[in-house]
Amino acid sequence: MQRGVLTVTRAELADMLQKFDVRKYVGTPIANKLVAGIQSNIDPINLEVSKEEIEMIMDDIGAPMPDDSANMSALRGKINQLLMKFQTETIG
């Protein structure tokens, strides 16, 4: 299983949680990490995530939209960078 660290700001995480329904994933590691992250006083937040968890997030937040906030756009960029890192590790 591939793992990496997704570093997000509290504002990016808050925007993500507007689209990612943690109730759908209650009791799962990803839901627990996201809830703990938003409840913490840490900024930025380092989330250790698997490739599968990143894919779950991407499925839930959906495709980029023209009205996405700057925080959501930044978050998508960070997620895409981490996915590219996973792909490079698989190929290399």
Image (cartoon, grey):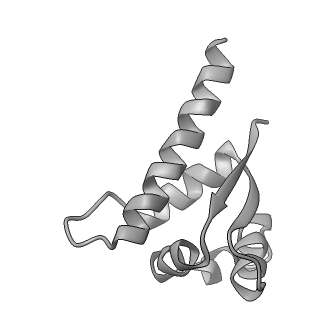
Q: Is residue 85 above or below residue 56?
A: above
For this orientation, the residue located farthest to the front is 43
- Number of numbered discs on residues: 0
- Residue 92 on image: x %, y %: 67, 11
For this orientation, the residue located farthest to the left is 66
Identified at 41% across, 67% down, the residue is 72
Identified at 74% across, 44% down, the residue is 4
For this orientation, the residue located farthest to the top is 92
Can you tell which quarter of the image residue 84 is in?
Answer: top right
- Residue 50 on image: x %, y %: 73, 47
Q: Is residue 28 above or below residue 87?
A: below
Identified at 61% across, 31% down, the residue is 85
- Residue 56 on image: x %, y %: 58, 57
Left or right of residue 52, residue 27 in this image: right
- Quarter of the figure with the N terminus: top right
Q: Could you say which is closer to the camera, residue 50 or residue 84?
A: 84
Q: Is residue 90 above or below residue 15?
A: above
Left or right of residue 18, residue 13 in this image: right
Q: Could you say which is closer to the camera, residue 34 or residue 56?
A: 34
- Residue 34 on image: x %, y %: 70, 74
